[in-house]
Image (tube, rainbow, N blue to C red):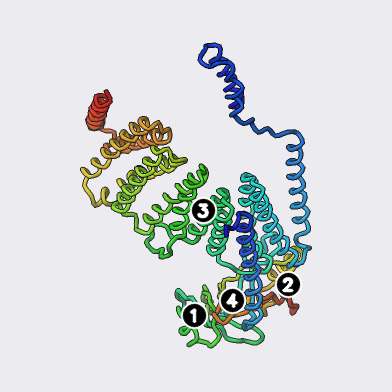
Amino acid sequence: MRVGAAQRIMAVAGVCALALIGLVVSEGNARASGQEVLLAMEAVDPRALLGGHYVIVSPAQSLAPDEQCPPGGDWKWIALRREGESHIVVGGGISREEAQRIAPLVVRGSFECLDPTPPADGAPGAPGWLRADVGIERFHINQAEAERIDLILRDQRPGEAARAYAIISIGANGRARLRGLVVDGERLELSWF
Amino acid sequence: MAAYKDRVKQDLDRWIGAGLVSAEKRDAILATLPEARRLDAATALAWVGGTLFGIAVIAFVADNWEGLPRLARFAVLLATFLGLAGLGAWAAHKERPILSNIALMIAALVFAASIGLTGQIFDIAGDPKSASYAAGAAAIALALAGRSTGAATVGLVLVAIGDFTDRQWFSGLDADTPWMLIAAPLGAFLALRWGSAPLAHVSALAIIYCCGWFAARTEAEAGVFLFLAIVLGAMAAGARWLYLQERAHASAFYGWFAWAALMFFGIAGYLPWFGAEGSDAAGIAHRIVWLASSGGLIALGRLDRHLLVTTVGVLSLIGAISALLMDLGLDLMAAASVFMLCAIVALIAGFMLRRKAT
């Protein structure tokens, strides 16, 4: 039986549409079933918000003058440790096993870190910072909300308690997916609607 | 410009006047020619109206995009894609190949955009390379299903974008195999099978890109470029054979492969083999072969009545002459000697060709 061009086209289009629906459903399921962690966020220069309807998600933590950066390297995995309500990066590894030797909870990603300046000669020292890259860049939201979050991120000062957190879902394969943000205690979660 | 039938009418009248064709045959000959397709006012207005309606819908959706629920936005994307694919299917069923081709090409583009927009709507962090490949594969599948040269062209471009994403050119560090190694020959096959000029040009460029990828896997070695120049030269010869067999659009492959062969050969002369680690004599030999190849290509282009090949030969000749002058540090006596030698070779070759022809 010869299949006509019209049937072939609709069959291919149907497969494409189903693949897209499947992607959305599977990502939604993976996001819902992963382990949830909160990572503190900071504003990103030159702008945390690029004028549109999204916030740049930049997980970052401040390091006090008496702290040190975790050992650096070309890490593919990072180890997380719970600290209060949120998690912080405590090290990295090339493999999952290597990272898990530092802390049991690990996620695919890398980090860059700047050591703090210790106090010396009466000077108080300066805090350092650590920025994590877990493959999540943006949180899409309406423009008014995005601008409000941007202002909050910019109001944060090093050393103060973080006011904005990224809600990350870590899947069984270690991949991070964004669930939403916590801003001043308010939870802004992604939904189907 | 007069339509073909109008021009034939004028010629026929002239031939009848000259007694070459009998007047009784005039109407029979003209009846074999189809009337030129003209867009009547009603059809033109329908197209304008349809286009404006489409723009109005897009503007309305864009203005309310943020206000739409996520699922509604996703549904808009799917409906647009399926609607265009349905239009292509309907046009194919009604044997309107141009409309089907255009609809499937736009459907392929909409699907590519849908992948990106779906990621945005549901905050799915994706890999841009995989997204481009998926969109390219979908476009090629639509092209194969509906014999759409437009969708095939879109597919090749998307695969190329996927290949180009996150590359470290000429570092020798890239280990991924580009999808274009499969897509480009497929595109070339479809271009020749379907007789599509745009697809022929795009797939010829895609094949050249594959050669570039092979070169980029190395740390810019002259031997690799020379090898690829020879491969492209052989492919140009194959395309020339198809061109001489009057295979539709083999001409595009012939021209592009000839250009690429000379380009790769030219670049090879500036890489380490002939440079710091090679000898000056090897450099001069390269330029002389470059000059001779360019001259030969001009002759071949004229012989085959192939404008692109002739043009490539002329441009290559200019490049070779410029390179030689720079090599010789504008030593005019040395340049005169080399050019004189080449001129004598060209004259002898031309003389021998003329003698052979007579």
Query: B327 or B300: which is nearer to us?
Result: B300
Mark 3 vs mark 1, CA separation in Å = 39 Å
Mark 2, residue position? A192
Q: How many marks?
A: 4
From this viewpoint, is residue A39 visible?
A: no
Query: B155 or A83: which is nearer to us?
Result: B155
The amino acid type of the residue labelled 1 equals: Gly
Q: Nearer the viewer, mark 2 or mark 4?
A: 2
The amino acid type of the residue labelled 2 equals: Trp
Mark 1, residue position? A92
Q: Are marks 2 and 1 on the same chain?
A: yes
* Mark before the other along the chain sequence, 2 or 1: 1
Pinpoint the chain carrying mark 2: A
In the picture, measured across the screen, residue B246 lies left or right of residue A115, that is left
Pinpoint the chain carrying mark 1: A
Quarter of the N terminus of chain A within the rendering: bottom right
Mark 3, residue position? B156
Mark 2 vs mark 4, CA separation in Å = 19 Å
Q: Are marks 4 and 3 on the same chain?
A: no
Mark 4, residue position? A176
In the picture, measured across the screen, residue B58 lies left or right of residue B100, that is right
Q: Residue at x 72, y 75 (%)?
A: A189
Q: Secondary structure at mark 2?
A: loop
The amino acid type of the residue labelled 3 equals: Leu
The amino acid type of the residue labelled 4 equals: Ala
